[in-house]
Amino acid sequence: MPETATLLVTCPDQKGLVSGISSFIFHNGGNILQSDQYTDVEAGIFLARFEFCLDGFQIPAGAIADRLRSLAEEFSMEFEIHFSDHIPKVALFASRLPHCLEDLLQRQQAGEFKAEIGVVVSNHPDAGEIAARYRVPFLHFPITAETKKRQEAEELRELRSLGIELIVLARYMQVLSEDFIANYPNRIINIHHSFLPAFVGAKPYHQAFLRGVKLIGATGHYVTMNLDEGPIIEQEVARVSHRDSIEDMIRKGRDLERTVLGRAVRLHLGHRVLTYGNKTVVFD
Amino acid sequence: MPETATLLVTCPDQKGLVSGISSFIFHNGGNILQSDQYTDVEAGIFLARFEFCLDGFQIPAGAIADRLRSLAEEFSMEFEIHFSDHIPKVALFASRLPHCLEDLLQRQQAGEFKAEIGVVVSNHPDAGEIAARYRVPFLHFPITAETKKRQEAEELRELRSLGIELIVLARYMQVLSEDFIANYPNRIINIHHSFLPAFVGAKPYHQAFLRGVKLIGATGHYVTMNLDEGPIIEQEVARVSHRDSIEDMIRKGRDLERTVLGRAVRLHLGHRVLTYGNKTVVFD
Amino acid sequence: MPETATLLVTCPDQKGLVSGISSFIFHNGGNILQSDQYTDVEAGIFLARFEFCLDGFQIPAGAIADRLRSLAEEFSMEFEIHFSDHIPKVALFASRLPHCLEDLLQRQQAGEFKAEIGVVVSNHPDAGEIAARYRVPFLHFPITAETKKRQEAEELRELRSLGIELIVLARYMQVLSEDFIANYPNRIINIHHSFLPAFVGAKPYHQAFLRGVKLIGATGHYVTMNLDEGPIIEQEVARVSHRDSIEDMIRKGRDLERTVLGRAVRLHLGHRVLTYGNKTVVFD
Amino acid sequence: MPETATLLVTCPDQKGLVSGISSFIFHNGGNILQSDQYTDVEAGIFLARFEFCLDGFQIPAGAIADRLRSLAEEFSMEFEIHFSDHIPKVALFASRLPHCLEDLLQRQQAGEFKAEIGVVVSNHPDAGEIAARYRVPFLHFPITAETKKRQEAEELRELRSLGIELIVLARYMQVLSEDFIANYPNRIINIHHSFLPAFVGAKPYHQAFLRGVKLIGATGHYVTMNLDEGPIIEQEVARVSHRDSIEDMIRKGRDLERTVLGRAVRLHLGHRVLTYGNKTVVFD
């Protein structure tokens, strides 16, 4: 039996939602540890997260989703339920820059993520050494315009066979195809090295330098068909001045990227991020 | 009929709390707009805030507290219920420095607080002009060691007759007596011009300057018997460097003080702050 | 005799600049209180600020510029010299929203600016009351598409006759014409209520809300021909979440706008901002 | 010949300092890349940093200090001169917690420090594996009350024989003796896991949790005889709420500690930190 369950709910706003869900949990012997809800009044949407203790819960974990179905139908509810004994497998995609990859591996080792890093994937061989150091399997998929389609198909096969549930692009410099993304909807997190929507696209620190901004940023977001336009999970900024060269911005940016990506991944793995439209609700 | 009610709850942690409260709201026809809860597992304490719509609610506002009593007894619950049509009256206490006083009056005018500024109280006459400009009654209570006891008693009489529910010390430089404070438990908010617990007591910017810190701060907190040691509601910091003189710190600090005090007062007036022990739970 | 002089210098980078300038100051009996320099190595440009004490200086203030000319020619130097006994006159332009206007007036009263607020200009009559409260002359210039050209010409006449040296757009909602701007190059400061270059143009908080960003910002910049694209002086951000409505963003934004505009104006008045290309060098 | 020299100067404030130093540099053929100065008017102290290009400089690097002597005497100047071709050796001291140690090693690998990590020293054997991974020599010095004196003497011998110029305490949990510290005055940087002067001593996150602060901090400072009271180089804070357990604070704190310690070490190695009294001047 897992220790806790986390229930994520999205549905049209209506009376009785909190009561209905919390009573389901209570009457089956659960104790709510944390509950959060948000109502987008204009859109008429209700989103909620309930984390409850399963000690003494009268429904076996495997049957809870089934038993929730009638409540879900009553409220036209979409829901997910996650159990604390399930340790999801994560794939880290990297290219040449190692700082985000190493940082995520270290956070995992420090116990910040309830997850297993199942594989490191890269279009460059360099990341293999880092993966080896942390005893994580490594897959090298060089990508060219010609091989991309084939390589992505192969990647997907591997990810599936490894049971990967979340893909984290740790400064991965290849654009994923729509087909690839469609396999992991809201399950691919990217770090963009600017304060989106400022400086989309390539070389954002160069763009920031040329514009003369006084703060630089980083954005952790889900990957969608539209590059750099997916739902934002987390953002942070750091101060710069005229004294900062592009190299200084890149250096300061590394700290931002690591911090923001680490937070975004942790929030996702804690089942604290719900998406609707092109936005996120983050129950932190 | 008010539009919404906000229910604040503190009780020993136990199963069925969220379910019990939310079902009470639902079964009487209320719609929960926002709910927040926090369980201090070690202390075994449950704290929660429910904001619900009273449109169609079947219990008259004036009777809700009564009808909640049996639920409250069942769960050994302490609770407060606040209604959106009640506009609380606030007293602002100031001394010579006008920035926090003016800032609060402006925020009120901009609609940031659901409150009425009922009176400005000062031990100096200067604040009278500011109060006049915002058409707020002004009371001048000069304080000396000899007159303090008498003046405080007089102040309390006035505050009571005005129906004041919250006192905000907007850089008020007199220490309130224990007797005075006892009349407004967790209903007096002070702004201390340092990042508490650093630099308690007098002249914190001077202390900060001497210590050579690289950040200065401000703290909004409830006033208790122990000076500068009450429950913290909000804190913020700003960067300083060796170039900043004490005067620069005082100037930068003014912005911090205004921001932090404004936020603390707004959080309190939104019934978003619960205290337990010497700490706050802030449901923002 | 003024107390201090501030010399701002821009020229091609070359050896001997700091030595040449500081020796000029020293050999004429001045004491450098603060010096800052920045070399844009790629552009080959040197920018510097020297603040020096005039007590015992052997050249009368009025003759210093003349005496600097040979040095300036030697180094192909553009320079400005400012004296501490010159209190520049500032015009504040506002529309309906009062918070930035009031804030600037208060900062001026608190002694944060070494300047005189010479006039408040608005296309709405409302600001007149605020101006009156601070005993600042008020000019009301309603603007329509037809009257704009004429009104701007009239405004310029008034500003000139008042000796205005700096114009601050305190949430002034009219776009200034190129002609108008050309009269005050790098002498008009605007506050844009977003983190530029994100959300240029109208209703940036609405844009930010729709995009689902996790931080909102404000930008103080010089006004140039290209709307929202002038050299940035200062920027700041504040955290928002899904809970923040557009109204909450507007409220939080007010604090950002006040702080950023206040800092930008203070930096300009302290002769701490130099522009080159479309960027600023801020010697703070 | 090194590329650049950095001259750090401390002396009584007086006229002609900038002129004297910059002329010395210019007349010997140097080009000043960056100069910063600070005058503590009350204390009457002048502190400055000049970074200049040695290309075409007419004095050999080894002779510059000698040639500066007469200028130094004239102005009662204490000075240090550093050359860019000198790569200082740094010792990292760690105990059980690896995050700061790993972070510094990674920053060094990323080229953030112009330094060589000469040795990792620890009172625990665990750090040995990390040191090995980065190919840095490791010294294990278990410390007990009885062995401390002897072990420190041995450590000093090793540090001296390795030519170590800077010691960084990367969450090193042993208190260094006064004797040890006296060997590296302003050459030992510690990271304290609180916003000093709040929460000095042991378990600052526990103290912060108990006090209910809304921000936690970290402080990078030089180590002096008085624990946690040395000159502060850099500080940073992060937001916490009632939801954050002590473990959450420790986790958030790790990011703060890494960032602050990294910045403090980089500033020191860039010869950007001068100390006077118990404070620092940071020319960043």
Image: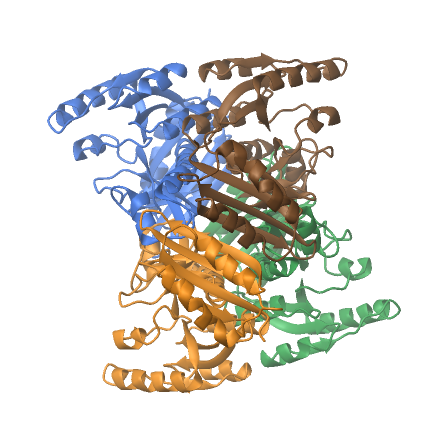
Chain colours: A orange, B brown, C blue, D green
Does residue C198 appear to the left or right of C146 in the view shown?
Answer: right
Q: Position of residue D182 (x, y in %)?
A: 77, 58
Q: Residue at x 29, y 63 (%)?
A: A201
Farthest right residue?
D146
Which of the two residues, A138 or C82, is positioned nearer the viewer here? Answer: A138
Q: Position of residue D138 (x, y in %)?
A: 68, 77
Which of the two residues, A255 or C217, is positioned nearer the viewer here? Answer: C217
Assign the N terminus of chain A to one quadrant of the image.
Answer: bottom right
**Which quadrant of the structure image shows residue D136?**
bottom right
Q: Residue at x 40, y 31 (%)?
A: C269
Does residue A269 appear to the left or right of B76 in the view shown?
Answer: left
Q: Position of residue D111 (x, y in %)?
A: 50, 68
Q: Position of residue B86 (x, y in %)?
A: 49, 28
Q: Is residue C106 visible in this depiction of the protein?
A: yes
Q: Is residue D58 visible in this depiction of the protein?
A: no
Does residue A76 appear to the left or right of D174 in the view shown?
Answer: left
Which of the two residues, B273 or D229, is positioned nearer the viewer here? Answer: B273
Does residue D248 appear to the left or right of A269 in the view shown?
Answer: right
Which of the two residues, C284 or C76, is positioned nearer the viewer here? Answer: C284
The image shows a total of numbered marks equal to 0
Position of residue D22 relative to residue A92, above or below, is: above
Q: Residue at x 54, y 56 (%)?
A: D6
